[in-house]
Amino acid sequence: MKTDPIYIFRKTWATYQKVISNNLMFHREISTAVRMLLDSRPGPLNVLDLGCGDAAHIGKMLNPGQVAEYCGCDLSPYALDVARNNLKPFGIRVNLLCRDMVAVLKEAPENHFDVVYSGYALHHLPIEEKQIFFTECRRTLRENGCVILVDVMLEEEQARPAYLDSYNRAVATQWKALTPQERNQVQEHIRNCDFPETPSVFKVLANNAGLTTCRRLEKHTWHEAWCFLA
Ligand SMILES: C[S@@+](CC[C@H](N)C(=O)[O-])C[C@H]1O[C@@H](n2cnc3c(N)ncnc32)[C@H](O)[C@@H]1O
């Protein structure tokens, strides 16, 4: 059944896995940069991962011995089932929640996490919720804690329609590893779900929340990784 949620999850997730294995969203370079930052924080770390999906990447970027607690949340129960398996080396310090990331952040304890990580999930939220994201991150971060944000971002001065045109053109002309049907699926997802911001807007949102040190870790086309600190 094509309307069955498990079928839809497997279908879109399979396409996303193909995107990752062909490095079309630069997961390789971005993971290397984030891993370097995480390596500089030996821990033990309390980590909150918002929109964790199957947690395959964070599972490789962190060493099990470095983690005191890992809390991941995602709206997809199917992704969390895969995450449970990918995070087995982390043992009992894993807590997976099938919930909205903003709701989880609002209930997160004050002054508790060393790292709040979010990979390719924040662009789903409207700007007001992105502000709440930074405000609540600041509240739940311990001293010297950081937010690590990996996401698609607009070029400075670029508006969403121009982003949609240029990203979808790149998918059409460069993402040859996908079938035409898979490319259509990706383009539809981008049109419906991508609400990216410029790095400057993220800096303002972070500054408003008291996260005043903002450092770019990596950038490849629209795919960026940033670190925000108090
Ligand atoms: C492209 S995947 C990225 C997964 C993983 N973070 C990674 O970097 O590979 C985006 C994930 O965000 C989740 N997501 C989107 N909006 C969300 C929300 N409001 N709350 C929690 N999860 C959300 C989706 O279910 C999906 O698993």
Image: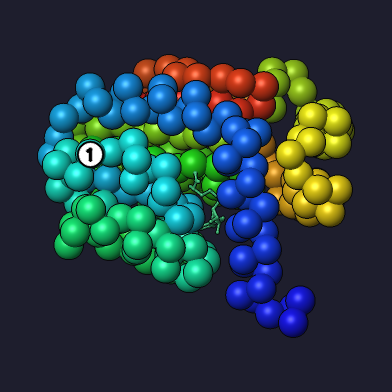
* Observer-nearest of 155 and 170: 170
**Observer-nearest residue: 210 or 113?**
113
Please report the residue visible at 59 percent of the width from the left and 49 percent of the height from the top.
Answer: 17
Is 60 on the left or on the right of 225, as rendered?
Answer: left
- Quarter holding the C terminus is top left
Q: Position of residue 225 (x, y in %)?
A: 49, 27
Q: Is residue 161 above or below residue 48?
A: above
- Residue 172 picture quarter: top right
Q: Which of 230 and 117 lies nearest the eye of the viewer?
A: 117
Q: At 62% across and 67% down in the image, what residue appears?
A: 9
Residue drawn at x 69%, y 42% is: 195
Dot 1 falls on a residue whose secondary structure is: loop
The location of residue 209, given as percent across then percent down, is 41, 34
For disc 1, the neighbor class at 10 Å (few under 14, some 14 to 19, many from 20) is: some
Estimate the x, y position of residue 5 in percent, counting from the top left: 64, 76
- The answer to whether residue 82 of the structure is visible from this angle is yes
> In which quadrant of the rendered view does residue 108 lie?
bottom left
Residue 207, horizontal then vertical, whole percent: 44, 25
- Indicate the quadrant containing the N terminus: top left, top right, bottom left or bottom right: bottom right
Quarter of the image where one finds residue 139? top left
Q: How many marks?
A: 1
Q: Which residue is mark 1?
A: 63
Residue 211, can we see it? no
